Image: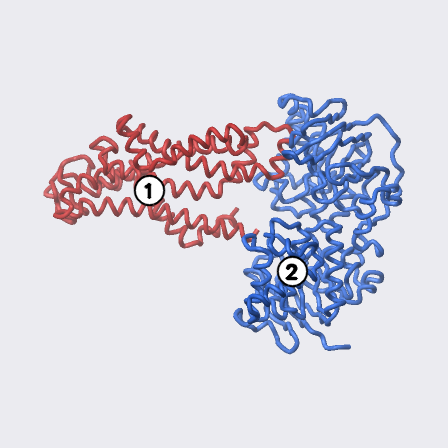
Chain colours: A red, B blue
Amino acid sequence: MRKAILPYITNPVVVIGAVLSFGWLFVAIFAPLLAPYDPIKTIAPLMQPGAANPAGGIFVLGTDMLGRDILSRLIYGARTVVVFATLATLTAYLVGVTLGLIAGYWRGRVDAVLSYFANVVLSFPVLVLYIVIIVVIGSSPFNIVLAVTFGSAPAIFRIVRGITMDVASRDYVAAAVTQGERAWRIMVFDVLPNATGPLAVDFCLRLGYTAITIGTLGFLGLGLPPPTPDWGTMVNEGRAMAIAFPHLVIFPCIAISSLMLGLSLLADGLREVSDAQGRRT
Amino acid sequence: MSKPILSVRNLSVSLPKGADRPYAVHNAGFDLHAGEILCIVGESGSGKSVLSSALMGAAPEGLAVTGGQVLLGETDLVPLRESQFRAIRGRDIAMIFQEPMASLNPALTVAAQIEEVFELHSDFDAAERARRARALVESMRLPNPDRILKSYPHQLSGGQCQRVVIAMALAMNPSVLIADEPTTALDVTTQAQVLKLVGELRDLHGHGIVFITHDFGVVADIADRVAVMRHGEIVEIGDAKQVLTAPRHDYTKALIAAVPSLTPHDRPVPADAAPVLTVQHLHHAYGSVSVLKDIELSLPPGRVVSIVGESGCGKSTLAKAMIRLIEAKGGRVEVAGTDILGLSSSDLRSKRRSIQMIFQDPFGSLNPRRRIGPMIARGARLAGASASEARSRTENLLEMVGLQKSAYWRKPGAFSGGQRQRVGVARALAMQPDVLIADESVSALDVSVQAQVLDLLRDLQQRLNLAIVFITHDLRVAAQISDEIVVMQKGEIVERGTAAQVLGAPQHPYTKTLLDAAPGRGTF
């Protein structure tokens, strides 16, 4: 087992990606300990980064126009992103993987119908789709998860369907069939475990996309209702005064970018290492 | 003796750290003369393919030539840079690979691909290139050269493709030709034709040919000299006749002894009993193409029937139809009194126990993510055994097929090809079937391992009184395992009888062709 992990932890791309991604996870988990101030408490408006708090201490990244500490909002904002991006990606996976396995394994009419719906959804620009959904059903944490699931599941469906078609043609699946194994058990125990490599890579990438999406929805004013700290909403609120007070926008942007970068690097690294291992065996 | 055209001296190729041995090839040396075929023979992992690609200056990624010389005439090829080597490849030394389809560009016509060789290595004008390409195709004894030249690779058969690849290799009339298992992917009759062609190249044009193969039958048919490789070393090299008839090294002796004989075994045919497997009027078609025509089979317990034929004859389709991996268009397959084809899919699941299959590819037939013990035990569970019964049955089976009980918690990656095939046998037997179908189950194995697995099957078959349908393209294997042989051609059974009848006194012309084409027939 140690041999299987070694190529991953010695790959610099994986390490940088993991440090950035898991760094934000750490921040999200320990937000109450890390944040210097209450993220929704009004203290002193539009302080520059490094300015002293009249009540003692400093605002490392400054404050926003409502006088809330930006660093604390970023730290708590990590929770929003981590929780909702992960939740939304997981539900998208649940739907996409289940339907992809079914379509790829049974093919025929089931596949035709499912693929048809997937293609219809995929034919919309994803952002337009999210906006339409959120505008129609309203903005709430649950609805954001729902919208992301609806928008991402078809792409996951297509990946899983393709891998399933490939794996289902292997002899070990035929062997399970000839033993009289039930189809769902073949999908879960024979097909799915052999699809995890490409799916792990896709999961990291998609987590990043979802984080961006949640940020974008926040920026468009369709994100989580205020005063929940949310990186995208912070950029949006700071936009009007960005020329005079760039720190309102820059720090949330760096937060979003670094998380996205971390997840992309992690995905790239995982693919690189697993490709190299695939070549060797 | 004349000066060798290719002389390999103390050639070593290192393996990356962590491999099972330090060298892929260790201190290999041989001379190749003009007009000579040198066969390099060995089992998988012996380093024979690495040796051949090292000669071409194309050692696989991660492997490096660490010492020795490859003298082509006066030039040592080992220190050459890639750019220098490119001028030599194709012009002085050319290579033919195992998979003809993969060696050709699917997007170019045959004519364009052959002419490309001239573009790279000569300054012939377009008309001259076309003329020479045509002449090459004609010299390959391909029917209707005009059609072939205009064809794309997918429009040609495997044998035709391989001859096109050989034509390309010969375009610049190289003095040395390296052929890496060039006939392994071909049917036996096509193989015979390509081997004949290779022999002619040596006799008529005086090419020196290094011919890599695992098949001693092929060696017996074409080799002038033979080098036997094991674990990266040449253990014996000498005249073909001497190596084949009076091998010196123990390993060569063992390899030759393991080559199955074409003479059928002389075990008595078991007495007739009520059949456990009856196939009636089984037919199948892909679209309008009929691939199984009115197949009839009947097999009592304790008997082995081999179904032999070339690729595309329908033998694998027959196996899959019998076990309902594909739905045949019609007919009956009765196993122990139940018509398998007539069952609804839910009834079928509970009746599958009675007919089980062993697959061809030991690497593709075991799920790499599952531990083999639970995998086998699952079969027993599905056949109705309790969890503890399944566990003990699995442990017994592991021992019965020659594996340790401790193999229970290992994954397939920990086993060799032959061991995996044993796991496959155990998995099939876990359901205690009445009929076992073995679809090319020893074809992917090295000859020595093949012999062991065949022995195992034979032994289990007698102990458990199994009926076995053995699908194979290899008449030698069929001769050793079968009580009866059925010959299939184009979806039809053209001949059937006891092994002795079919192999000793074949009646149908196709059976005779197959027997004639079996490589090394005069030697083994």
Q: Disc number at residue A216? A: none
Tag 1, which chain? A
In the depicted view, which residue is nearer to us: A107 or B155? B155
Left or right placement of residue A98 versus residue B498 in this view:
left
Callout 2 secondary element:
strand
Q: At which x and y percent is residue B428?
A: 69, 34
> Do the residues at pointers 1 and 2 share their chain?
no
Q: CA distance from mark 1 to mark 2?
A: 57 Å
Q: Which residue is mark 2?
A: B96
Tag 2, which chain? B
Judge depth for marks 1 and 2 and give the one in front.
Answer: 2
Q: Label 2 is placed on what type of residue?
A: Ile
Q: Label 1 is placed on what type of residue?
A: Phe
The answer to which quarter of the image holds residue B500 is: top right
- Would residue B459 be seen by someone viewing this image from the given angle? no
Callout 1 secondary element:
helix
Query: How many residues crowd around disc 1 within 10 Å: few (fewer than 14), some, or many (20 or more)?
Result: some
